[in-house]
Image (cartoon, rainbow, N blue to C red):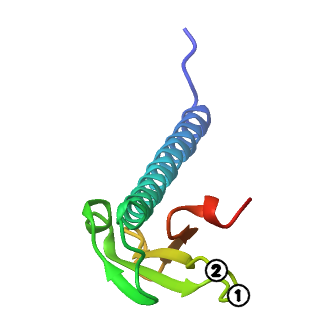
Amino acid sequence: MRGFTILEALIAIVLFIVSAVSIFAAVGTGMNTVRDIKENALASAALQAQIETVRSNSNLPAVGTYNFNNTPLSNLVNGIGTVSVNQYDVNLDANLLIVVIRVTWDSRLQSTKHNTKRLGALIANKGLGTIVP
């Protein structure tokens, strides 16, 4: 009977270790990617919830910058939400505003990585149909 030499056994062990390390690295990268996707989804949900709040209000918001907090935003690390409201065009008869909602947060993986998502919308008194023919 012929057995394995020490050299063959060492080569097999090295190949096994290299493949195991590669698999663990791939799993770790995949988990980090999933976490980033989850954070982006939470930020998008916070943006969408806030724009719906602004749109559903019967009165137009006042011009200025305001902070907000909602459930998706509270699930982000150091999540900060701001709403900026500005006059879009003062020459139009209707009160047309541009609303920009911004969410910033810190990554759970890297505390030095700051993320930002923005969403903008035009809002008019009685809807955009009063402005666009």
**Badge 2: residue crowd in 10 Å (few <14, some 14–19, many ≥20):** few
Looking at the picture, how far across and down is residue 14, in whole percent?
56, 43
Comparing 26 with 17, the one in front is 26
Q: What element does badge 1 sit on?
A: loop
Can residue 35 be seen from the camera position used here?
yes
Can residue 120 be seen from the camera position used here?
no
Looking at the picture, how far across and down is residue 63, in whole percent?
46, 89
Looking at the picture, how far across and down is residue 22, in whole percent?
56, 46
Looking at the picture, how far across and down is residue 110, in whole percent?
43, 74
105 shown above or below 39? below
Quarter that holds the C terminus: bottom right
* Type of amino acid under label 2: Asp
Comparing 59 with 98, the one in front is 59
2 and 1 marks in contact (CB < 8 Å): no
Task: Find the residue positioned furthest to the right.
Answer: 133
Q: Tag on residue 91? A: 1
* Type of amino acid under label 1: Asn
Q: Is residue 46 left or right of residue 121?
A: left
| Residue 10 occupies quadrant | top right
Task: Find the residue positioned furthest to the top.
Answer: 1
Comparing 87 with 29, the one in front is 87
Residue at point 47% right, 45% down?
27
Q: Is residue 70 left or right of residue 124?
A: left
**Badge 1: residue crowd in 10 Å (few <14, some 14–19, many ≥20):** few
Q: Tag on residue 44? A: none
Residue picked out by circle 2: 93
60 shown above or below 7? below
Q: What element does badge 2 sit on?
A: loop
11 shown above or below 54? above
Marks 2 and 1, how far apart in space? 7 Å
Residue at point 38% right, 62% down?
46
Quarter that holds the N terminus: top right
